[in-house]
Image (tube, rainbow, N blue to C red):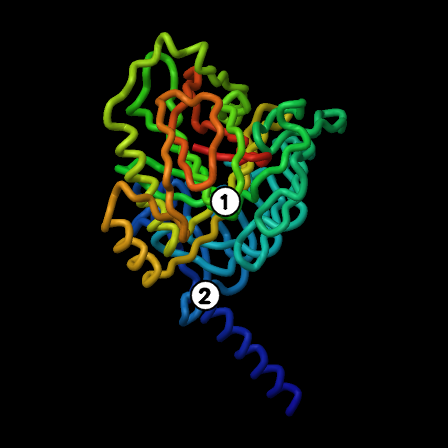
Amino acid sequence: MRKLLTYTLTVLFVLICINTYAQDKQTLYYDQNGKGLDTKKKAVFYRRVVLDDNNKPVGIVEDFYMNDKPMAKGEASKIDKFDNNNSRWKGPVEMFDEKGKLSAQNNYDEFGALDGHQVAFNSEGLKTDEFEYLHGNPTKDYYLNYDKKGNTTRYSYLTHLPMKLATSDKVIVPFTEKKLIYEDGIPVQFYYIDGLSVAVKISTKQLYGSYYEAYVIIENGSGDQFNFDPGDITAAFVKDGKTTEAEVLSYNDYIKKVKRRQGWTAAFTAFAEAAAATSAGYSSSTLNAHAQTSSGRSVSVHATTSSYDGAAAYSAAQNASNNITQMVNQQYDIKRSISEGYLKLNTVFPSSRLIGFVNIKQEEADHILLNISVNGKVYHFEL
């Protein structure tokens, strides 16, 4: 009798747990930008997740395409109902294509950054790419791409194309150091490391002929001078998962076609100061790794980390507003500014700023990959 009572209570307990789990399981809808929606109208995927009283995810999180095929499956350390860009996977996570076929096996650390071994597959279930990350950063300057016979080729993280002299043996600045702000709705990515900052923006509103214009700021707050050669800039286009090399024009190639643009220098200088003020309180880094599989399919992995210090941001903003022409970035003053329009070879002295732009021959693209070599290190941007 006692055994029967124990068995009955156990069954009841399990049923109660299952019922509670089912009641707490929620369906969340997101649009193409990862913003939360109240209904599935305009949604591109939905999520099934259990959240505890503190809105912490419990157990396995499952994402689905709107055709009900699986999209992703794994555990998460954070789920944001309103903005999926703030959500964080943790541990092993499986990714699927729109037909429900396994497309990737990723691993994340406790902060949602890619960590460890990552594998991508094609629709036939064959391995196409292997990546190695350590807390959001590649452990090498290349990853492995597999053909249908299992042969491997080293692909550059900078261009997502086969390695060659221009991309091999480069010291890549950690991707997680990249930050993002907006200027008049235009994304601006920048790094600030050891007194040196590099910022880039590309605006589709500022096209000249059949060329993109990439605006660049380099600020030298270190104690060393160095030569900056825009001839070392490389770029690539990503369109529908396929990557092609882009042509970055030199000053001599393009100077006859360049029309000087009034006002952009002042606007970009204002951005630089805003970036300095903003970076004191807010940092957001996004990592995207793209590769073309042997079947021509796009494979991507994504991780984002962010933090904010309101007091620091307010203090920096106050300093910035005092004098828009005086650039104050992380406790150093810019005393000399080189602003000559199209970028040319220049020596960047301590406490100086170089501002200019380069043109990239235009092709239709979903993303532009831009790699800028500064003082022996490559700064990678994805715009």
Q: Is residue 53 above or below residue 72?
A: below
Q: Residue at x 62, y 53 (%)?
A: 92
- Going by the numbered disc 1, the residue's amino acid type is Ser
Mark 2 near mark 1, Cβ–Cβ under 8 Å? no
Q: Secondary structure at mark 1?
A: loop
Q: Looking at the picture, how far across and down is residue 339, in whole percent?
A: 35, 27
Name the quadrant containing residue 243. top right
Q: Nearer the viewer, mark 2 or mark 1?
A: 1
Instruction: Identify which amino acid the numbered label 2 is placed on.
Output: Lys
Find the distance from the CA under tag 2 to the CA under tag 1. 43 Å
In the image: residue 150, left or right of residue 143: right
Residue at 35% of width from left, 60% of height from top?
Answer: 312
Question: Residue 318: which disc?
Answer: none
Asked if 306 appears above or below 125 in the picture, the reply is below
Question: Going 45% across and 29% down the picture, which residue do you hit?
Answer: 367
Mark 2 or mark 1: which comes first in sequence?
2
Callout 1: few (<14), some (14-19), or many (20+) C-alpha neighbours within 10 Å? some
Q: Position of residue 232 (x, y in %)?
A: 55, 24
Check the picture and name the quadrant holding the N terminus: bottom right
Answer whether residue 150 is visible to the viewer in this image. yes
How busy is the neighbourhood of tag 2: few (under 14 within 10 Å), some, or many (20 plus)?
A: some
- Eyeballing the image, is 158 above or below 274? above
- Seen as rendered, the residue at the extreme top is 256
Q: Which residue is mark 2?
A: 56
On the question of residue 71 being in view, the answer is no
Residue in the foreground of this view, choosing between 299 and 321: 321
Give the SS element for disc 2: loop
Residue depicted at x 66% and y 35%: 143
Give the position of the C terminus as an image quadrant. Answer: top left
- Which residue has dot 1 on it? 222
